[in-house]
Image (tube, rainbow, N blue to C red):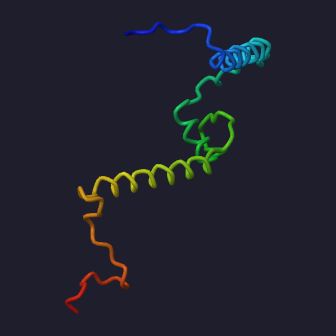
Amino acid sequence: MTSKPRLHDTSTMLPGLVAVALFGVLAVVFLGASFGDAAGFPSGAGITAGIGYAMFNITSVEGQNIIPSEGFLVAFLIIALVLDAALDGAVLLASRDEGGESSRQVATDGGTTGGDDE
């Protein structure tokens, strides 16, 4: 015996109304927001080089027209550390055996991995 879906279920009415209300608020905010005029790049400015200079907070280079921007060195370093930690975690998880134990021998006795045969 199959049953038909119930359309008038009050338990799903409240989340649906909240979603519609949130959509309405976000629509009003986005449609009512005013943005400044678009600023173009100066003529002769290298956009790729400008991104690199902005990332490392370099403000002036002889003979180059640098696009004024904010420095992103701290954000670059944080992202690099997080990606490095994620890569290390992926390598550690990939090197596990079927039993859940690590296949790599970890030195916890001051650097020697000799074990019991000392």
User: Residue lying furthest left in this view?
Assistant: 117
Of 89 and 58, the residue lying toward us: 89
Image location (x, y in percent) of residue 67: 65, 33
62 to 112, vertically: above or below: above
Is 21 situated left or right of 107 in this image? right
Nearer to the camera, 18 or 47 = 18
Quadrant containing the N terminus is top left
Query: How many labels were placed on the picture?
Result: 0
In this rendered view, identify the residue nearer to me: 4 or 113: 4
Q: Is residue 19 above or below residue 100?
A: above
Left or right, 103 with reference to 35:
left
Q: Residue furthest bottom?
A: 118
Q: Residue placed at 34% from the left, 82% from the top?
A: 111
Identify the residue at image location x=37%, y=79%: 108
Residue furthest front in the image: 1
Q: Dividing the image into 4 quarters, which one contains the C terminus?
A: bottom left
The residue lying toward the viewer, choosing from 45 and 62, is: 45
Q: Is 14 on the left-hand or right-hand side of 61?
A: right
The residue at the point 44 percent across, 9 percent down is 3
Percent from the top left, x then y, of residue 22?
A: 72, 19
Q: Position of residue 35 (x, y in %)?
A: 76, 18
Q: Is residue 114 above or below residue 19?
A: below
Q: Is residue 112 left or right of residue 87?
A: left
Q: Quadrant of residue 100?
A: bottom left
